[in-house]
Every structure is written in structure tokens, then in C-alpha cells.
Amino acid sequence: MGVPGVVLLSGGIDSSTTLAIAKENGFEIYALTVDYHQRHRYEIRAAKRIAKALGVSRHLILKLDLSKIGGSALTDQIPVPKRHALGEVGKDIPSTYVPARNTILLALGLAWAEVVGATAIFIGANAVDYSGYPDCRPEFISAFEHLANCATKAGIEGKRFTIHAPLIHWTKGEIIQKAVALGVPLQWTHSCYDPLPKGVACGQCDSCLLRKKGFAEAHVPDPTKYAK
């Protein structure tokens, strides 16, 4: 087995591709999925299928009800914004931003990494084709890495944690091309923020629009079923 690495796996294209990249680089994969009571909980089922298909050593699913905090269209009674044009995406921080989500997820990943002896933590953050979330930017990844090394027993004892965000500067098209090359079952990934019953993608939220854009740019058929 390779060196252990913790991968944050949501069940979407980015996190699934990140997992495949970590595996390609020889890491033994400890996949972490957080059920934070998100509106689009179909992604948890997707994460289970992806983890099994890509052969992780362990897939941990944690429950953390962020709906008790709220403040996001993904965890509260707030409508998911629907766009009419892709150019509107990323111009502001949308209501689908979940307060401190990536900080929370990385903190959980860091805790698990200490337990399993991993110093590498992978996250599928992207700062090119994204919705404008502040916790997807390179400066956030760098700041959290610094925190990880000064706030943990392992860090104080000399183990150096590294936060890997291999997709941070990639377009969605480039990510999909890499996913195809690594055999990621994209038909099982889930992106939609506001799925209809049975998980059918709405086709109009930011995540659906970016997904469509990515497949078009990659010249890869989009296997997603959209309502619109």
C-alpha cells in the first residue's frame, strides 16, 4: 500500500477527479464525505459509488447538521439561485455559499489525518470555473496549511501537513478531460444544488451551468439528465 492520504469526497466531478489524481500519485486513499444536511444530499450516494469504483482503502461518512446554523441556500429555507446565463456565475458570492464549509471540512479531514498517520490532505477546490466562494481560493488553501502545521500535535512534533488542491487553477473542461483519462465514472457524479425528486439535475443552478460548460469544453458527452 502507498502512503496514506485523506481525500475530501463530495461526490461531484472535482472531488472525484481529485481522488483519482491522489490514487494516480500512489496514495492509499482515505475518503471523507460529510453529510452536513445539504439540500443536494444525492451527492452522498454518488460519493459512495465513486469511492467503491475507485477502490479506496476506507470511506468515512460523517454526519454534521449544518442546517442548525443555516445561512445558506444549501442548508436553509433559502431559494437556490437560478441563472439565465453562464456569465452571471462567479460575479458575486451567491446564497449557495455555506458559511465556513471548506474550513470545517478540512478541519475534519485534518483530524482524521492525524489518526491514520496521513500528512497529505486533498481537496477539490477550484478558483477558475467556480461560483465565487472565498474558501476555494489559493490563499485560503495556503492559510489552512499553515494552520494545520501549528495547531496539531503531529505538526508540533515535526510532521509536515500539506493541503493538496490539484485542480485549483484548472478549467472545468480540463478537469473533465483528466477525469476521463483516469477512468472516473462521471455518470455517477452529482453536481446539482437543487435536484428534483430522484436526483434529476435542475439544469439552471450555478453548478449545473458549470458542469454543462465543462463537458462542452472537454468535447465529452454529458451523461447528466437535466430537467431543463
Image (spheres, grey):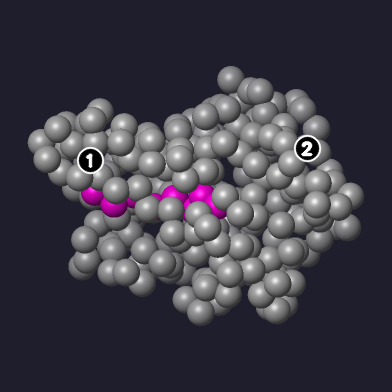
Q: Is residue 196 visible?
A: no
Disc ID at residue 26: none
* Residue visible at 35% across and 67% down in the picture: 23
Disc ID at residue 80: 2
Q: Is residue 102 visible?
A: yes
Amino acid marked by disc 2 = Val
- Expressed as whole percent of the image width and height from the top left, the position of residue 187 reads 64, 69
Q: Quadrant of residue 212?
A: bottom right
Q: Which residues are magenta?
A: 119-126
143 shown above or below 202: above
Per the image, label 1 sits on a secondary structure element best described as: helix
Q: Quadrant of the N terminus?
A: bottom left
Crowding at dot 2, Cα within 10 Å, few <14 / some 14-19 / many 20+, comes out as some
Taking depth in this image into account, of 77 and 138 the one nearest to the observer is 138
Q: Quadrant of the C terminus?
A: bottom right
Amino acid marked by disc 1 = Glu
- Expressed as whole percent of the image width and height from the top left, the position of residue 158 reads 12, 40
* Residue visible at 84% across and 46% down in the picture: 83
Mark 2 and mark 1 in contact (Cβ < 8 Å)?
A: no
Q: Is residue 121 within the magenta segment?
A: yes
* Residue visible at 74% across and 64% down in the picture: 213
Taking depth in this image into account, of 94 and 201 the one nearest to the observer is 94
In the orientation shown, which residue stands out farthest toward the top? Answer: 69
* Residue visible at 51% across and 50% down in the picture: 125
Labels 1 and 2: the sequence-earlier one: 2
Per the image, label 2 sits on a secondary structure element best described as: loop
- Expressed as whole percent of the image width and height from the top left, the position of residue 122 reads 39, 52
Q: Is residue 141 left or right of residue 136?
A: left
- Per the image, the residue denoted by label 1 is 114
Q: Is residue 199 within the magenta segment?
A: no
Q: Is residue 116 left or right of residue 185?
A: left
